[in-house]
Image (cartoon, helix red, strand yellow):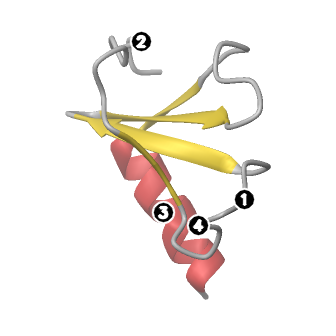
Amino acid sequence: MPQQRDLRDAKWFKSSYSPTQNECVEAAMVPGVVGVRDTKDRDGGTLVFDSAVWSRFLDHVKH
């Protein structure tokens, strides 16, 4: 399990498929990890994934 990284200054983004929605998740990438949080509750907690795990997840979702 990766160590938690400081995501306070990370650039958060959401899918281009939901440009006007605020009811989705957004992600931030820093070296080695990806943070994922709810746009409705940005202070409610962040899931942190190893970058390689996140990449495999995205590959699986795309296929």
Q: Are marks 2 and 1 in contact (CB under 8 Å)?
A: no
Residue with the mark numbered 1: 21
* Residue 4 pos. (x, y %): 41, 12
State how far apart marks 3 and 2 are (Cα).
20 Å
Helix, strand or loop for disc 4: loop
Q: Nearer the viewer, residue 13 or 59?
A: 13
Element at label 1 = loop
At x 63%, y 33%, the residue is 37
Measure the C-alpha gap from mark 4 to mark 1.
6 Å
Q: Position of residue 12 (x, y in %)?
A: 41, 39
Mark nearer the viewer, 4 or 3: 4
The residue that label 3 is drawn on is 56
Say which residue label 4 marks. 19
Task: Report x, y in % for residue 52.
Answer: 36, 50
Q: Residues within 10 Å of mark 2 (few under 14, many from 20)?
A: some
Specify the amino acid type for callout 3.
Answer: Arg
Give how far apart the Cα atoms at labels 2 and 4 are.
28 Å
